[in-house]
Image: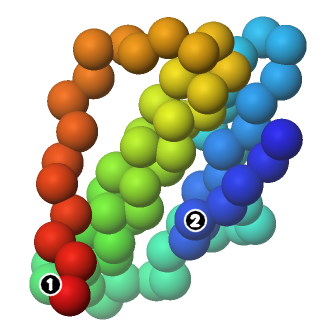
Amino acid sequence: MTSAVGKFGVQFDASGVHVTAVGGALCPGCLSDEQVDEQIQWLKDDLDIIAMMMKNVIVERRGKPLGLKTREVDTL
């Protein structure tokens, strides 16, 4: 099983859940501190989503809760 979010992917196989990088460069060239901060924040946001996906895969595959904290999502 493989899923992707932004520049990262989640892959599940017999050895567990893995984070993979999708494509080449993880961010474009940056010319200022602000650009670096913005690009890194985007990567962190993607990794937060990947972490939730990985935890969901583990719970689904093993059928046991892992005692992980969850966030409530507001719906409109």
Q: Residues within 10 Å of mark 2 (few under 14, many from 20)?
A: some
Question: Residue 5, relative to residue 75: is it above or below?
Answer: above
Q: Quarter of the image holding residue 52?
A: top left
Q: Where residue 35 appears, x then y in whole percent?
A: 25, 85
Amino acid type at image mark 2: Val
Q: Quarter of the image holding residue 7?
A: bottom right
Identity of the residue drawn at 63% across and 12% down: 62
The answer to whether one can see residue 68 in this image is yes
Q: Which residue is denoted by mark 2 in the rendering?
A: 5
Nearer mark to the viewer, of 1 and 2? 2
Identity of the residue drawn at 47% across and 31% down: 55
Question: Residue 65, relative to residue 38: is it above or below?
Answer: above
**Residue 33 versus residue 39: which sits nearer the camera?**
39
Q: Where residue 13 appears, x then y in whole percent?
A: 83, 23
Contact? badges 1 and 2 (CB < 8 Å): no
Quadrant of the image containing the N terminus = top right
Amino acid type at image mark 1: Glu
Q: Quarter of the image holding residue 16?
A: top right
Identity of the residue drawn at 22% across and 78% down: 75
Q: Where residue 3 appears, x then y in whole percent?
A: 72, 55
Q: Which residue is denoted by mark 1 in the rendering?
A: 34
Question: Residue 72, relative to residue 32: is it above or below?
Answer: above
